[in-house]
Amino acid sequence: MRTDHFIRFERVDSVEETGHGLLARLHGEQLRVDVVRPDVVRLQLSRGGRFDDTPTYAVCVDPFEADVAWSAQPVGGDSGPNAAWRLSTDELVVTLWLDPFRVDVHRTDGSVVIESAPDAEGRYWTYATLNDAWTTRRRIGRDDAVYGLGEKGGRHNRRGRDFTMWNTDVLNEHATAEFRAGLDPADPRADMTSTEFDPYYVTIPFFHLRDAATGAAAGSFVDNGYRGEYEFSHDDDYRVTFHGGQWTEYVFAGPSMAGIIERYTWLTGRATLPPLWALGYHQCRWHAYTQADVERNAKRYRDDEFPCDGMWLDIDYMDGYRVFTWDSNRFPDPAGMLKGLANQGYRTISIVDPGVKHDPGYAVYDDGLEQDVFCRTEGGDTYIGQVWPGNTAFPDFATPEARSWWGALNAKHVESGLAGIWNDMNEPATGNIPAEAMLFDRGRAKHERFHNQYALLMAMGTIEGLKAARPEARTFVLSRAGFAGIQRYAANWMGDNQARWDHLWVSMPMACGFGLSGQPFVGADIGGFQGDTNPELFLRWMQMGTLTPFCRNHSEIDNIDQYPWSFGPEIHDLTREAVRLRYRLMPYIYSAFVRATETGEPVQRPLVLDFQGDPNVVDLDDEYLFGRDLLVAPVTEQGQSTRSVYLPEGDWYDWHTGELHPGGQRITVDTPLERIPLFARAGSAIPMWTEAPASTDGYRPETVELHVFEPVVDGRWESRLVEDDGLTVVEGAPERLTTTVTVARAAGEVTVDHETTGPGYAGHARTRFEVVHHTPA
């Protein structure tokens, strides 16, 4: 970041109180300090004297809907280095220093949330501008940890590295060449083979900062869709720069990361409850399938008694890559095929890219021109990029008309029997034609304002159409790109990974980064998308992937076959056992998703979220919690027969052997080919199906097992099972059953109680719980 030409905002001219906080004037601009919640404030600086109250589509609530008590008063006199205004709530104190201008936020106990950082000459960098760019600079401890920022590679602790916020088709040389050219060749971000390659497909300008001394965390969300940079590589400060738009930042006092996520997802929305089938195992491949091929694969899964819920269709199902079409030669009867698959318990999902083939006579293109819903250039022409069909036009999703038009196309598309939509190439990817000429809002908004929001807006339109087509059914959309708030509409997968051991590993911190950024429904292409996998890598990835939120086997065209039966009977049977475990755990997984929709907490989570005060988990990213009570430690190296596992506070049962281990220590665990390390928290009650069905479709068991893991110390633990039909929209007072299981130990006696509430639902068949008691003996 160059600093020599930045213009610093150095002095506040006046301050007054408003209905929500303070309004300050400085250098011709206005600064708002607004109270959102007792532990959340918004900082906002005007551009050209005006405020943009909706800088992006991320925030989905009125930030000021709650009546929060606060007070403000001047302190330290009218001028001088101690002059300031102080705004206080029950949980934080904001200090607006007047000269030099800076903003600090502390908790009421005096601990730091954010503090402005001076440069070597003592000049503060609360806010500075250069052309349309602005930057802010804040203190950070050398051992403090940074988490979040959505989809980023490398270690899940972002400290010590710099990141670019710009949705990018990472395998497109044209999209990444300019960025890589500006880096030192030794920088791992410049090497596409590195797990630290940056930027990725999804931009979420939200992060947690954990204080190394206290373990307390603070959060920051910059509501800005322009290109940005976060610099965490400096010794004593971190720097945030955006290349357009205004400074609109929500600051979260914490101190718990879980509390920060709860507040952030209240602001930007929480994931909607997915249909149960979306949590099953899915088969996908980029391949020029015929209808007979798809039906043959589906039959093979059923013949092999291998659980599977989803069959996916990549780009070659279309007629010349024209979206919302079918290749009639390969698929002579799509409706008949989809009905046949549904009768076998499969849901089918098709890919839909935003690029509409520039092809006069193609109905979608012609109608888009007539409805005037495509992006324009500065000269008013239809912007043309290049994707799979060649020259393509792009819907202007910044307008409600384009989103509605797109939604209607999706609604018509699923009438054939499709169950969900897969959005790809929505960064937006434009091939070797620069995207910057693509203007939005009928040519009134420059590209940079909406680039990072494009996938979010596309998902909004898609969901609008799916809800109109099937208002009673839960929707499912998978998106490659996204922005803050994408969790409201779509799941994310991690894009085009590679069949490599380090890509298996990096999918863990990447998933946890998503989870800490508000997106709980995420997963990597199992086995690796690019390149040929091998039997051991495929097995180990399947064993891990079945214990992640989104579970899909996907690979690229011209790779070797990557089906479970492609590597011989041993690998087939072991991968089937891994998938069967996922299906038996479905009640536990589903209940974890319900909690995510209620609180925003992730399903796949780094240990630091639940054990924030433990310094041993600050940089731990080769294991994770799946839900609250299962600890997963995947095998990440070829030929690995043992691995070290860190067990956090508490006691933990080895899932496979039943052996009990006290927490707060590292242990060495055997990793034979048939399993990866998995542990259950003592005191938990894990709900499970008694068997693994072929699919979730219509499966209504009479018995649910409660696997109770006996605690060995006194205490009280709660677990939860949520049951509903798994298909229909759940709003208001949902038709469901919620069972809270309480395990308690006192004076050597262990008790297990449960309470079930709720009206139930049509089709409910469970009549009993079967308790499976796990003891240290």
Image (tube, grey):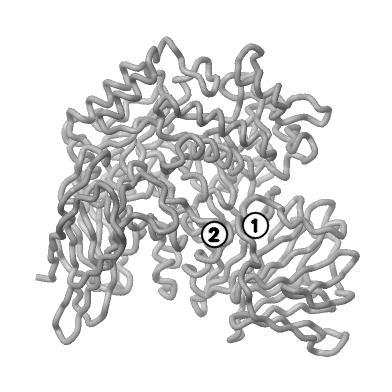
- Identify the disc placed on residue 158: 2
- Identify the disc placed on residue 397: none
Q: Residue 358, percent across and down?
A: 65, 18
Name the residue beneath numbered marker 1: 230
Q: Residue 690, percent across and down?
A: 15, 51
Residue 363 higher or lower than 40, as above or below? above
Residue ID at (70%, 33%): 435
Q: Is residue 44 left or right of residue 721?
A: right
Report if residue 25 is visible in the image.
yes
Nearer to us in this view, 298 or 417: 417
Q: CA distance from mark 1 to mark 2?
A: 10 Å
Nearer to us in this view, 47 or 618: 47
* Neighbourhood count class around disc 1 (C-alpha, 10 Å): few under 14, some 14–19, many 20 upward: some
Q: Is residue 530 left or right of residue 42?
A: left
- Quadrant the N terminus occupies: bottom right
Residue ID at (56%, 68%): 209
Check contact, mark 1 vs mark 2: CB within 8 A.
Answer: yes
- Amino acid type, callout 2: Arg
Q: Secondary structure at mark 1?
A: strand
Nearer to us in this view, 714 or 395: 395
Report if residue 514 is visible in the image.
no
